[in-house]
Every structure is written in C-alpha cells, then in structure tokens.
Image (cartoon, rainbow, N blue to C red):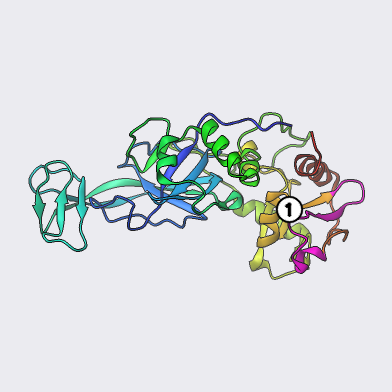
C-alpha cells in the first residue's frame, strides 16, 4: 500500500545557541523526543498529531519524525524587550558590548525591559518514529524547502513533497518509510471491536491530546502481568503499554488492542523491525536488526504470552504493513 503523502509538515528550529530567543527565556527541547513552544509564537495552534516534523539547528538537518501527541498547560513566559521600540526581536551577543542589540531599530543596550505574560505551553512528543539524519541537508537546502520563501519563524511550514524527494535522493528511504507509515491513513480499518469504556481519544480544545493511556496500561498490566510479550518477565517499571496499531491514526484505546512491551521492544515494534509472523505467532526480526545478538536470538521464538483473537487481528495488520510487499 502506498502511504499517503501528507500535505502539511513542519520545519522546527531546535533549542540551542542558534534558536532565536533573545527576547524570551528559551525553550526546553530534547531533539530526539519532544519539542516545546508557547502561545506567544507564530503557528502555535497549527501543529497537530500526525504531522511530520523536521528538526534543524539553523545550520543543518538533525532528524525527522511524526508528532504522536501534544500536551498543553497554562503558565507564564518571561519576555525581554528593547527599551527604545519595545520589540522582543533582540539579539544577545557573547563577545560584544553592550550585550544586547535590537534587530528592529538597531538600538544597543546593556539591560532589556523585562516582564512576564500568561501563555499556554505546548510540548509535542515524537520519539517513536525519530530518525537521526544529522547533516544530511544543509541550511540553504532546508530554507529552500520551506513552503514560504524567506520565512524566519522557528516553526515554519515545510513543503513535504519536495522535502521527501530530497531525502530519497540522499538514500534516506528508511526515514521516509517511518514517517509515511505513521501519518493518518484512512485505509487502516478497525477490527469489529468496541472501544474501551474509559476517558480516551483527543481533546480538541486547542490540540489533540492522548488521553486514557494510564488506564490502558493498567488494564493491560492486570491481564498480562509483569511480562514483555516478546522477551518474557520484566519489572513493571520498564514495561510500556504498546498499541498494536497507530494510536495517532485511530485516536482510540481498544481493550484488546495492545501488549505490554519493554521500551526498546516497543520502539522496534513500532518501527516494524520486530513483527509477529501470522499463523505461527512467532517473532520475526528484520535483517537490519539481526546484527544485534540480543534481538537476533528472538527470531522464530514464540510470543511469551497468550494472545486473544482480537490481538492476532491487529498483529496481522502490523505484519501486512511492515513485511508484505504491496
């Protein structure tokens, strides 16, 4: 099945010396896991679950992924303004005095005007599909792939079709597959099974937010015990409730739609590097992963837990997505 190319994607400026935040107190980013921003910046409402993202540091591409969830919380933000024109477009200089310079009126000054404003803080998590592509594309190439030429915002729309072609031209097909395999896809049908009757789905007030994950984990842990379905017994604290389908696509927790998995196994299953062969219900290890003994030894091994018919249906769909050539 040909994955649908999304029409919306984002080029995100990662935190660090090059992320322009001279007018505020900065952001808490972990480039391979999550990205933070607030309601005081352009495009703050526009990012959504299922959107592909590319992270860069104003000099080079860092990596790509897909937004899995977006959380929000109210808070405050410290702003620093030019004492002459009051803009927040100020640059902090390391080796020149006065320390600050206004990017609008060119005023130079030692101390900015400081005040706090109320904002909504956002955090997008995307670690499951993260692929490191450090330096694969240059700053000039990335700027040229933005939807709007000359866009200077930290979060700017990205021309996904052209960006995808640029990655394919650099032999980054695996990265493209990870992204396109996780964007919303209407062709992934649900089994004939009712959803779990607890708070779930997405909160559409500002952005879509994953809800009910704690209850979903508790329900799976109670039924499966402290066991990773692929590797066997493990402390509960290292086990995660792994959906056997893309939650970002369906937005629903199905009662028999998951298994408890070790965190590393969970991520490898999401990537399709670990799968379950239909019929025999034995673990299949992808060639790219077979070079690692701890995973190679799982190949051909039966699952460590008994699975229900509904779980087998989801595992078959996962196999079709990652192992069957369409």
In the displayed image of the protein, which residue is found farthest to the left?
Answer: 84
Membership of 295 in magenta stretch? yes
> At x 61% / y 34%, what residue is drawn?
184
* Residue 254 percent location from the top left of the image: 71, 43
Q: Is residue 173 visible?
A: yes
Relative placement, left or right, of 46 versus 271 is left
Q: How many marks?
A: 1
Report crowding for label 1: few under 14, some 14 to 19, many 20 or more residues within 10 A (C-alpha): some
Q: Is residue 262 visible?
A: no
> At x 61% / y 45%, what residue is drawn?
172
Relative placement, left or right, of 151 versus 295 is left
* Residue 252 percent location from the top left of the image: 64, 40
* Residue 158 percent location from the top left of the image: 46, 35
Magenta stretch, residue numbers:
277-297
Q: Which residue is mark 1?
A: 273
> At x 11% / y 58%, what residue is drawn?
111
Relative placement, left or right, of 190 versus 13 is right
Relative placement, left or right, of 191 versus 164 is right
Membership of 28 in magenta stretch? no
Q: Quadrant of residue 229?
A: bottom right
In the image, residue 262 sits, relative to residue 257, either above or below, namely below
Helix, strand or loop status at disc 1: loop
In terms of depth relative to the viewer, which is nearer, 113 or 154? 154
Tell me the quadrant of the picture where the N terminus can be found. Answer: top right
> At x 53% / y 38%, what residue is drawn?
51
Tell me the quadrant of the picture where the C terminus can be found. Answer: top right
In terms of depth relative to the viewer, which is nearer, 85 or 19? 19
């Amino acid at each position: 099945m040909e994955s649908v190319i999304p029409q919306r994607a984002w080029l995100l400026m990662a935190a660090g010396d090059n992320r322009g935040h001279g007018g505020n107190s900065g952001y808490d980013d972990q480039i391979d896991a999550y990205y933070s921003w607030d309601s005081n910046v352009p495009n703050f409402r526009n990012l959504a679950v299922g959107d592909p993202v590319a992270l860069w540091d104003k000099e080079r591409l860092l990596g790509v992924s897909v937004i899995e969830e977006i959380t929000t919380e109210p808070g405050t933000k410290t702003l620093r303004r030019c004492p002459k024109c009051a803009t927040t477009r100020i640059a902090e200089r390391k080796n020149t005095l006065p320390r600050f310079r206004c990017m609008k009126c060119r005023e130079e000054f030692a101390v900015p005007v400081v005040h706090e404003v109320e904002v909504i803080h956002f955090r997008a998590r995307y670690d499951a599909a993260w692929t490191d592509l450090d330096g694969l594309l240059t700053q000039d190439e990335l700027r040229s792939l933005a939807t709007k030429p000359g866009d200077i915002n930290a979060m700017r729309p990205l021309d996904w079709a052209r960006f995808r072609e640029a990655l394919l031209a650099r032999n980054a097909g695996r990265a493209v597959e990870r992204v396109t395999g996780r964007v919303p896809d209407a062709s992934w049908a649900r089994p004939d099974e009712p959803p779990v009757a607890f708070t779930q789905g997405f909160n559409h007030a500002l952005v879509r937010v994953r809800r009910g994950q704690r209850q979903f984990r508790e329900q799976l842990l109670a039924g499966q015990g402290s066991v990773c379905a692929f590797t066997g017994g493990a402390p509960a604290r290292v086990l995660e409730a792994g959906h056997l389908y893309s939650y970002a696509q369906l937005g629903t927790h199905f009662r028999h739609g998951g298994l408890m998995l070790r965190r590393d196994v969970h991520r490898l299953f999401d990537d399709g590097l670990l799968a379950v062969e239909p019929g025999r219900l034995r673990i299949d290890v992808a060639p790219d992963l077979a070079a690692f003994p701890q995973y190679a030894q799982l190949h051909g091994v039966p699952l460590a837990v008994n699975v229900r018919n509904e779980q087998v249906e989801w595992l078959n769909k996962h196999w079709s997505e990652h192992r069957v050539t369409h």
